[in-house]
Amino acid sequence: MKNKQEVLGQYFTKIEIVERLVDFLARFKKYSKQAQILEPSFGTGNFINILRKNGFANIEGCEIDSELTNKPLDFFKLSLDKKFDLIIGNPPFSKFNLKESYFDPKKYFFSKISPILYLTKSELKKSKEKIENVFILKSLKHLKDKDSSIGFVLPISFFIKNKNRSVKEQLVEHFSTVVVYQNDQVWFDRNIPCCFAIFTNSKELKNKIVLIYENGEANQEMYDISGIHEELIPQIVFHKTKGNAQNRTGVPLDNFLDHKSIKAQKSFSSNNISASNILERTKIPKGISVEDYRIAVVRVGNSSVGKTGLINIKKDVINDMFYVFDVKEQYKKNKQIKEAICSAINNKVDYFKHITSRVGSKSIKKEDILSFKVQV
Ligand SMILES: C[S@@+](CC[C@H](N)C(=O)[O-])C[C@H]1O[C@@H](n2cnc3c(N)ncnc32)[C@H](O)[C@@H]1O
């Protein structure tokens, strides 16, 4: 198979990361050394090796690739009679533009273990589903009892607001505690934005979602389980609440900007303003009506996101990389305020990089700009 690495999602978790994740899980759920454990896609076996090193004796594993094991086994063919205390590992992730990397239910309809047994109605309707989601759904059917847990490395995009709703709903039916962990290290030989998610039942953390981001210190935020469909990305929550790229003091831009959408002239082919030249437009030229100037903030792109300039709404043509804002009525003729807002955002452009660069969607929301604090 060409591009096997991408089709099968073969990114192996670094051994020192696996050590950290296995220790981390033990903080939330303790298992006896006799606990029955499944690693459903073991790859080069790092999770299994660390678990064994930690004294766990009953570990089973699946791995589909015969180049990695002499007993290849497709997790979707593992009998549902098999039940486990803990299912832990790093399942394959589907790659957005690679059809073969998705789970195709048709492929398994005639298998002994039909997808009907583990997919929800909403997934059954689809012709393809993200493979990591199906790893989760099938794992739910392998849980032994209320003390069983799942600990999976997942793409961080899993926890974007309102994504994967039906899978999250299934998860909270089984589990009343969700922990999402990120740190500032690279977990594979490539930097894939991901997290380690623990789904468990813990008396102390009943009905809680815990987000932990480690970057030399442990930053923790806690939410009620009812927030499961919210954006649960520890690193971004950290940058929004504690990170020093955001101004801790100052006034939210909301106080100066209007929420209304602004109609600007747009074109991809014949614009005079794009993310690459917006920083040449941070001043309002003398002799031109200040009222005609609007604030344009780049909303996408790792290197340009957050860059801000002033555009002339009557003359300038932009591409669709921007959010365009007007100031509130009382500031419309205020050159100083418009320019000061621009420079305040540009001085802290790192903030916008931090809150976007590691998420699948790679774009900022309007509310991220409106809640950004400036001192003008
Ligand atoms: C992201 S890698 C992770 C491997 C290992 N868990 C780790 O953390 O190093 C995913 C693994 O899943 C395997 N895989 C893909 N589809 C599978 C399936 N249906 N059943 C079992 N293994 C599968 C791939 O071959 C790959 O080795």
Image (cartoon, grey):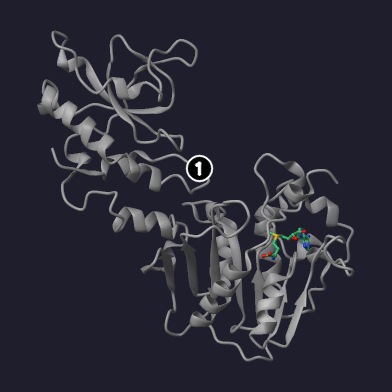
Q: Residue at x 47, y 63 (%)?
A: 183
Image quadrant where one finds the C terminus: top left
The residue that label 1 is drawn on is 361
Using a 10 Å C-alpha cutoff, classify the residue at mark 1 as few (fewer than 14 neighbours), some (14 to 19) or many (20 or more): few
The foreground one among 35 and 130 is 35
Query: Picture coordinates of residue 84 (x, y %)?
Result: 70, 81
Query: Picture coordinates of residue 42 (x, y %)?
Result: 74, 68
Res 323 quadrant in image? top left
SS of the residue at dot 1? loop
Q: Is residue 36 left or right of residue 73?
A: left
Q: Is residue 156 left or right of residue 50?
A: left
Q: Residue at x 49, y 66 (%)?
A: 180
* Residue type beneath disc 1: Ser
The foreground one among 143 and 116 is 143
Q: Residue at x 50, y 42 (%)?
A: 361
Q: Can residue 144 be spotted in the picture?
A: no
Query: Picture coordinates of residue 89 (x, y %)?
Result: 66, 69
Query: Picture coordinates of residue 251 (x, y %)?
Result: 16, 45
The foreground one among 171 and 68 is 68
> 159 above or below 85?
above
Q: Can you tell me which quadrant of the image ligand 1 is in?
A: bottom right
> 270 above or below 229?
above
Res 258 quadrant in image? top left
